[in-house]
């Protein structure tokens, strides 16, 4: 029955690339598979951390679904087979917590970040601060503030310096920070707003300016095990591993601030 339910869920949620695995525990090998839905900005760091974890736990494999935190939370609300949720803000973790879709005693904060403005490398834009952005600029890539935390943080910062309303017509909304990077890399937008860590994922962009920390809510990444997980103990162990010295060093290497 569990296999049938998971196959049906895979049809309903094609975003899970790992759905070609028909069960989270392989009865032949004894391997436990943990499904992790994580903010797109975590992709590089989490892939490396998962390798480290699997080396220490050879009977566990980790499969990821990376996207905007809001979209991931909504998928969990709709019944996606997820064991761990890693969000780029507290809001979406709170939403799931209020709906009892996470195990509150497993919730931790494991990383922090900064907000930056980027431009295409060698574009030579005359911008050196958020306050220097003018409505005459070409299009601006920003994560959709309704579902992408980076977009929400950027909106806060721009509202703080009274720039949001004047720039509204220039915005091109992206589904996550990876898409913002793509828009700027390709030159489809002149600038974009991403996390400081995202700039290490691309050699085609430059940081033009960093937003002041008091312009927006602190960027903190929470993680938790879902209440519907079929692999609660393994999922708890992975979440705990994120606070280990080894994982924290990897996060720092990928541009995140240690918690």
Image (cartoon, rainbow, N blue to C red):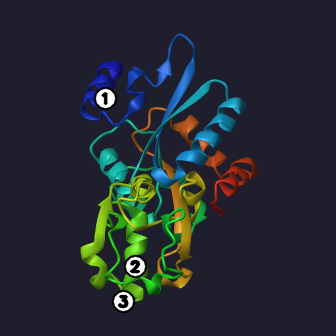
Instruction: Point out the residue furthest to the right here.
Output: 245
Nearer-the-camera pick, 223 or 137: 137
Name the residue carrying label 3. Answer: 162
Nearest to N terminus: mark 2 or mark 1 = 1
Crowdedness near tag 2: few (<14), some (14–19) or many (≥20) residues, C-alpha within 10 Å: some
Q: According to the image, label 1 marks what residue?
A: 10
Q: 163 left or right of 244?
A: left
Alpha carbon of mark 2 to alpha carbon of mark 3: how far?
A: 10 Å
Residue 21 in picture, x, y percent from top left: 42, 21
Query: In the rendered view of the protein, which quadrant contains the N terminus?
Result: top left
Image coords of residue 112 (percent x, y): 59, 65
Residue indicated by mark 2: 156
Going from N to C along the chain, the mark reached first, 2 or 3, is 2
Which is closer to the viewer, label 1 or label 3?
Answer: 3
Q: Nearer the viewer, mark 2 or mark 3?
A: 3
Q: CA distance from mark 1 to mark 3?
A: 44 Å
Q: What secondary structure is found at the residue carrying circle 3? A: loop
């Amino acid at each position: 029955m569990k296999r049938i339910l998971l196959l049906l869920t895979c049809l309903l949620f094609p975003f899970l690339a790992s759905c070609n695995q028909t069960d989270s525990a392989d009865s032949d090998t004894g391997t436990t598979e943990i499904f992790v839905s994580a903010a797109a900005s975590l992709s590089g760091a989490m892939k490396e951390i998962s390798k480290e974890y699997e080396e220490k736990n050879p009977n566990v494999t980790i499969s990821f679904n990376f996207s905007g935190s809001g979209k991931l939370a909504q998928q969990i609300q709709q019944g996606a087979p997820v064991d761990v949720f890693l969000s780029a803000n507290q809001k979406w973790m709170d939403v799931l917590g209020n709906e009892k879709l996470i195990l509150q005693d497993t919730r931790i904060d494991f990383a922090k970040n900064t907000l930056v403005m980027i431009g295409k490398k060698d574009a030579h834009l005359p911008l050196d601060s958020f306050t220097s952005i003018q409505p005459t600029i070409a299009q601006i890539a920003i994560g959709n503030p309704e579902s992408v935390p980076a977009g929400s943080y950027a909106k806060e910062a721009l509202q703080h310096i009274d720039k949001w309303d004047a720039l509204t017509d220039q915005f091109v909304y992206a589904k996550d920070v990876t898409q913002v990077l793509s828009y700027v890399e390709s030159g489809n937008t002149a600038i974009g707003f991403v996390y400081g860590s995202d700039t290490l994922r691309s050699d085609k962009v430059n940081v033009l300016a960093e937003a002041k920390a008091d312009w927006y809510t602190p960027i903190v990444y929470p993680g938790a095990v879902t209440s519907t997980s079929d692999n609660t103990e393994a999922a708890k162990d992975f979440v705990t591993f994120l606070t280990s010295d080894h994982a924290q060093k990897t996060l720092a290497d990928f541009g995140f601030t240690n918690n």
